[in-house]
Amino acid sequence: MTSSPTGPSHTDRAEVIRRNWAGEPALLHGENASGYDELLAQVRRALVPRDVVEEIWTSDFVDLAWDIFRLRRMKANLLRVRAKDAVWDVLGPLVRNAHDLAVKWAARDEAAMNQVEAALKRAGLSMDTVMAATLRQEMDEVTQIEAMITNAEVRRGVALQEIERYRASFAEGLRRALQQVGNSAPHAAPVVRPPPAAQEAV
Amino acid sequence: MISLRKRYANWLNARASTGPRTAAGKARVAQNARKHGLRVPALRDPAMTKSIGELARKLAGPTADARRFEAACQLVAAQIDLLRIRQARLPLLSRVTEGRTAVRNLTTLDLYERYARSRRKSAMRQFNSTPVAATSGQAIPSEASSNEIDIAAVLRQIPVQNVRSREFSIRVDRRYPRLARGLRATRLAILRKQSQRGARTKPTGKNQDKTMFQDEQRAQRR
């Protein structure tokens, strides 16, 4: 009995294959599992994997896409978390209690935030300066995360290429098999000829 | 300060007496420098060889030839490597904002992942190119793979070893409390001695980066 590639039994089997080959989804604490499932379902609908190989590459594609989102988010979070040190650095020559102010600013204290903005404005600076200072301090890590994002993007492309390549080779194999069948049984498909009566009439 | 002669004698004695002698001891100390074990492919890990072989046999099919079976082994091992790396990445990813070490370690794992992916890609290509001895038209039999080829299960068996060693040390503590106390005291004494030891090298006159044993310097002075 066969089921359609998108039918429920096929989906269950595909899920079993995916879990057997790729394990449980690698999610961090606090990450949205339903978001991952939604992404997986969308990609699966688009690629329609037909067998194990395609399931592996599809799962790979989804993991890498998820990884790219995650790394981008982490880069932003990293800069946000480390901005406190940059605020301290920038405000150091401007105000007296720069460290305390930076700590309160990081804790989103309203008064401290206003004070920081005012101090920056007085010196002709803005929050862009603070973010630039953060980036300068964290350049090494940001570069490394960027490199990881680039690698993941390349790997995601490779996963797609491999699916294409596999499908092409699979189609080629089928074509060759059909040719072999045709060569081994030349009379399998009868040649349609006009009946003798019609030939005589012509 | 110990003299050069005494140190040489100590070194000779140490060479003659230290180090594990039993096979179990040797096996244990062989893992002293092990950090995560991700550098070693799963195919070279004796603990996994059996599982890889079984999975590869199911993957290749009962009538597969040696080439196909080898490719299946490579494929399964590479997939295990990838899963291990992915598992190792998770705790590091959650610590990215805490320190610089996490990002550095992630970069290292990224390199390992590249190697593993490369191995898996070539293994998969080789596997698909090898002729299927069975009558099925697909390169990998989906029906068998869906239930029987559970690669993730191999990894679920790995942490057992660590748990076992931890349980063993707990058992020793409970059964032989005096021995455990003695071991802890010895470890503490060694640590204390190490912490009290002063710098054994000092910069040479010519180059501040180069250092020389003080004994050697003393020998030169004489």
Image: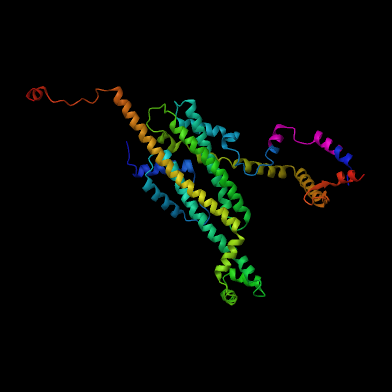
Q: Residue at x 46, y 51 (%)?
A: A65
Q: Residue at x 59, y 58 (%)?
A: A139
When the figure is inspected, residue B208 is found, relative to residue B123, above or below; the finding is below
| In this picture, residue A174 sits left or right of residue A26 | left
Q: Residue B117, percent across and down?
A: 51, 41
Q: Residue B89, percent across and down?
A: 56, 49
| In this picture, residue A159 sits left or right of residue A113 | left
Q: Residue A199, percent across and down?
A: 10, 24
Specify the farthest residue to the left: A201
The magenta region covers B9-27
Q: Residue B145, percent across and down?
A: 44, 36
Number of marks drawn: 0
On the image, which quarter does residue B174 sit in?
top right
Specify the farthest residue to the right: B222
Q: Is residue A31 magenta?
A: no
Q: Is residue B22 magenta?
A: yes
Could you tell me which quadrant the C terminus of chain B lies in?
top right
